[in-house]
Image: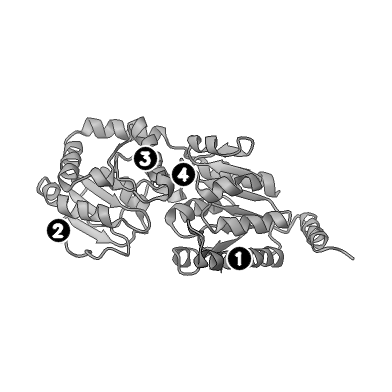
Amino acid sequence: MLTEKQNFDRQAASLEGNASVPRRLLIAASGTGGHLFPALALAEQLPDYQIEWLGVPNRLEKDLIPSEYPLNTIAVEGFQERFGLGTVKIVGKFTTAIRSCRELLKRGKFNGVFTTGGYIAAPAIIAARSLGLPAILHEANAIPGKVTRFFGSWCNTVAVGFEPAAKLLPRSKTVYTSTPVRSQFLAPEKHDLAIPDDVPLIAVIGGSQGAVAVNKFVRQSAKSWFDNGAWVVHQTGENDPDVGNLQHPHYFHAPFYNNMAGLLQRADLVISRAGAGSLTELAVMGKPTILIPYPFAAEDHQTYNAKIFADAGAALVFKQSELTPEILRKQVSSLLESPDKLQRMSEAALSLAVKDSAERLAKLVRQFLE
């Protein structure tokens, strides 16, 4: 009598023998644009694959993914620092999540798993490897997350977005690919806002979830920028209690912009957090940037991300705890009055860009799934 593993291998072999059957890939990416957008960029490079998504209920993927790919969800969350009753509940959810992933992979006859890390990666990787399926992980940050450091050795390979990350991972498994961006960031895009062509434009982006502290700095600084003829487009996120407090003809705000590529192409200067996904988009667009790393990011990874851009001359970096509206006001005004410096920063940003990152990552996926 065949074991479960033998049955699964026999089904996989049957699929491999049928050239008309496309490869099936499960992408596990959840929560933020930094996890979702690189995975979407990879998926664009695999048009011959049947792709399904693994996410968590009530996260960003519920809005972005269903129109593109079938979305499956599991209940899973990160582990707490201290052991307690909450930890026991999380372990229970984690065990259930692994079992759900295994059932999904078997039922869907998937050929492998790709993940961009985060806590959803752990059950997906464990389930895939327990079934003998390949698992490919992409780590976008300069400091790998805990899940990546722990489960990277379980994967067939780990692609890294910043080369320093490889120093903290098994060298035999790491491949530098940079971080993929969606195709619209690689081709000319027009913005859809009524902004004159001959005015300086400042884009404020706090990542897919916004940044309340940065928003406050911007609102307290913006009047002087308006007085000097600048315009501001501000992505505020969904959780800003002060949305609407600033009103000005040169000011546009929204919780989230779908046409971020068009906005960034038009922008003369960007104020941003330092999430790896946002930084990669800024690099390929060649945008001078003022970076304010999120101070509570896991292991302060945004500061390490930002340092790479600062060292290259592509960005000015300020700790949130040391920044004031007055400092931000002066720094922005100084940059807008220095076109030569903006140009040098733009060239430095472009020097960090790897525009074929999605193709590199897709090639890696094909290497292990075909």
Secondary structure at numbered mark 2: loop
For disc 1, the neighbor class at 10 Å (few under 14, some 14 to 19, many from 20) is: many
Secondary structure at numbered mark 4: loop
Do the residues under discs 1 and 4 have CB atoms within 8 angstroms? no
Mark 1 vs mark 4: in front: 1
Separation of marks 4 and 3 at Cα, in angstroms: 10 Å
Which is nearer the eye, 272 or 187? Answer: 272
**Can you say whether 167 is above or below 97 in the image?**
above
Q: Name the quadrant of the N terminus.
A: bottom right
Which callout, 1 or 3, points at the residue further toward the start of the chain? 1
According to the image, label 4 marks what residue?
141
According to the image, label 2 marks what residue?
249
User: Is residue 109 visible to us here?
Assistant: yes
According to the image, label 1 marks what residue?
97
Q: Quadrant of residue 256?
A: bottom left
Secondary structure at numbered mark 3: helix
For disc 3, the neighbor class at 10 Å (few under 14, some 14 to 19, many from 20) is: many
Direction from residue 242 to residue 106 in the image, left or right: right
Q: Amino acid at mark 1?
A: Ala
Residue visible at 53% across and 39% down in the picture: 177
